[in-house]
Image (spheres, rainbow, N blue to C red):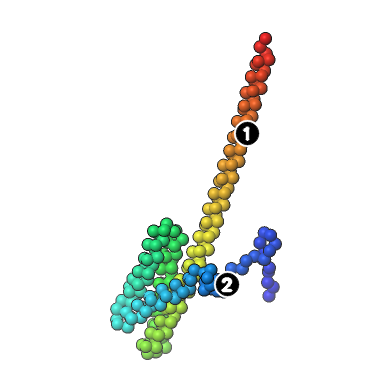
Amino acid sequence: MERSNSTDGNNNPAKKNSMIRNIIEDFSSRGDKKILRAIGRTATVNAAVLVTAATGGAAGAVGYATGGAIAAKRLSEGIAQNDEKEVTKSLAVYGCATGASIAGQAVTGAVMIGLAGASLPLAGAVAFGVGCCSGITAGALSEWTVDSVMEKVGGMRRKQRSDFMERCGSEGALSSRSCESSREVEELNMTRSESCQF
């Protein structure tokens, strides 16, 4: 299989945006700990779902309420700081991670008990693990997706602003040149009219 070597406009190898590099950077001092936040958030939601399901409660509702409480803090902080990226992330992560956690746990529990005939404790443990993995993956991927989309949107906005300023500068230069030309024409006309007078 042949690999293509992509380059940027300067014939330098293009930066590869690999998942592994993102994960390594996330745990470094440069990262913003998306994965650690996803683990904590997802474990909390899945624990609430597991405990509620074991006691016969409405596990899905409790999971969404728990995820909503976690998302509400992040959402309010984003609104207070007027940070549209954090607002978007809080909503995307809440929907994706909480939905994936609950779905992963429910489907796995049903398959383990219904099809595999596993005991409730075993099915609960496996469902908890699958729910956590699903939520962590969905939460981290939704954050990276929001980062990527917002970065592209920001780049487009900066380009539009730059193009607009360039056009304004060009129009300003044209209007100042036309003003200079009109002054020259006026001066020429005045000179002609003065020379025509005797």
Q: Secondary structure at mark 1?
A: helix
Q: Is residue 19 visible?
A: no
Which residue does the image show at 33% across and 73% down from the upper left? Answer: 61
Which residue does the image show at 63% across and 34% down from the upper left? Answer: 177
Residue 154: which numbered mark, if any? none
Q: Position of residue 104 (x, y in %)?
A: 42, 78
Whether residue 95 sits left or right of residue 171 in the image: it is left
Whether residue 58 sits left or right of residue 187 in the image: it is left
Image quarter of the C terminus: top right
Q: Secondary structure at mark 2?
A: helix
Q: Which residue is mark 2?
A: 21
Residue 177: which numbered mark, if any? 1
Q: Which badge, 2 or 1, comes first in the chain's sequence? A: 2
Residue 40 in which image quadrant: bottom left
Q: Position of residue 98 (x, y in %)?
A: 40, 72
Asked whether the residues under the numbered discs 2 and 1 touch, taking CB atoms below 8 Å apart as contact, a structural biologist would say no
Can you name the residue that lies furthest to the left here?
Answer: 56
Can you name the residue that lies furthest to the top here?
Answer: 198
For label 2, the crowd category at 10 Å Cα-Cα, with few meaning under 14, some 14 to 19 and many 20 or more, is few
Which residue does the image show at 55% across and 74% down from the upper left? Answer: 24
Nearest the eye: 133 or 186 = 186
Nearest the eye: 80 or 144 = 80
Which residue does the image show at 50% across and 64% down from the upper left? Answer: 147
Amino acid carrying mark 2 in the image: Arg
Q: Position of residue 73 (x, y in %)?
A: 37, 66
Q: Is residue 188 visible?
A: yes
Whether residue 137 sits left or right of residue 69 in the image: it is right
For label 1, the crowd category at 10 Å Cα-Cα, with few meaning under 14, some 14 to 19 and many 20 or more, is few
Amino acid carrying mark 1 in the image: Arg
**Label 2, label 1: how many angstroms apart (C-alpha)?**
53 Å
